[in-house]
Image (spheres, rainbow, N blue to C red):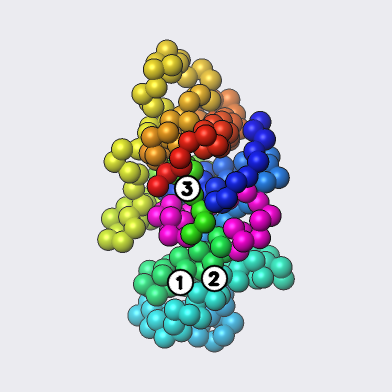
Amino acid sequence: MTTYSPEVPLKVLAYGGTARSGKNTVVQEIAAQYPFVATDETGADYRLAVWSLLELGELEPGMPKDLVMRRVQAVGFDTLTAIVAARPVFFEAHTSEELHTPKIDDLVHLAGPAPVLRKAVKAGFCQRIENVRDSGSCSVLLVDGRNLAPVVHSVGGTAVVMDTFVTCSALEAAKRECNRQKIPLSSEKGQEVYMSILRRNHSDAQRPHDPVVPNGDAIDYWNPGIQTLHEHDYADPVLRGVGSLAVKSGRQVLFNTTFFRRYEDPRGSMVSAATQMFDEALERAASYVPMA
C-alpha cells in the first residue's frame, strides 16, 4: 500500500461514468484504506436541491415538469449554489435516507435538467473542492460523478492525477440494482429497473452539454496495450501498469466493471484492480507532471 506525502497542488482522481457501474463503491473503498484521502460526489446535490426547495415551498409534490423547471429557474443560480456548497452542513443534521423519499424521487428527474441547477451543482461542487484544498486536512481527493474531471480542472490549486471512466453493461447495472433492492431481475419491477438504466445511459450519452462518454483515446483497462501485459491470461483481475500509464500519457482509463463478474469475488476484484491503479497513479505522479 502506498504511503504518500502530499505536495501542493491538491491531487484529484476523478471517477466518472455510467449508472450503477461501481464508481461510488470504488471511491469509498479506496478512501477507507487511506487516511490522507477525502471524497466528494455530485449525485446527492440534485436531491439536496429538491429537498431544500420543498422545504422552502418553492416545489410541491406532483408538480408538472414545466412548472418545476420554472420554479427552479426562478430560485436563481446564487441560492442554488449556496445550497449545494453547504451539503456537508446538511449531513451534520440529516441522513442520506431523507434525500431518497418518494416525493424527491418524483421531482429530481424533472428538476435535474434545468440549466441553472446543473450550473449551480458544478459551482457548489467547486466550492467544496476549494474547502478541501484550503483546509490542508487531506492531500488526495477522489471525486465521483458523471463527468467531473473538466470541472476539477477549473479549480485552481488542484491537479487531476488520473481520470477514470467507470462503466458496465446495462444488464450488469440492472443486476446490481436489483440485488440492492432485493428483487428478481426477471420481475416486472426488475425489468423496469433495466429499462430505466438503458434510458438514463442513452440520455446521458446523447446530451448536448457534457455527454457521459469515454474519451476517444482512453486506455482500455482490459486491453491497455502495455508490452508487459501481453501475456496476461486474466486469471488475476489486477493488471499492473495501467495507472502508471494513465499518468504518464495523460489519458483517461476506460474501466469496464462488467467483466469482474467472471471472478469468484466480483466486488472485491473490482476494488483491488482500482486500488492498484490508484497506488500506481500516486507513485507515478510523485515524479511526473500530472494531467494538464
**Considering only vertical position in the picture, is 60 above or below 210?**
below
Residue at 59% in and 82% down: 55
Give, as a three-letter code, the residue at label 1: Ala
Q: Determine which of the numbered discs, if any, sits on residue 120 in the image.
A: 1
**Considering only vertical position in the picture, is 168 above or below 146?**
above
Distance between the alpha carbons at the discs numbered 1 and 2: 7 Å
Q: Nearer the viewer, mark 1 or mark 3?
A: 3
**Considering only vertical position in the picture, is 283 above or below 127?**
above
- Is-magenta flag for residue 93? no
Ranked by sequence position, the earlier of labels 3 and 2 is 2
The front one of 226 and 105 is 226
Name the element at disc 2: helix
Percent coordinates x, y for residue 236 in the rendering: 53, 20
- In screen coordinates, is 286 left or right of 2? left
**Considering only vertical position in the picture, is 10 above or below 253?**
below
- Magenta span covers which residues? 131-155
- Is-magenta flag for residue 147? yes
- Cβ–Cβ under 8 Å for marks 1 and 3: no
- Cβ–Cβ under 8 Å for marks 1 and 2: yes
Residue at 34% in and 58% down: 210
Give, as a three-letter code, the residue at label 3: Val
Residue at 28% in and 55% down: 206
- Cβ–Cβ under 8 Å for marks 3 and 2: no
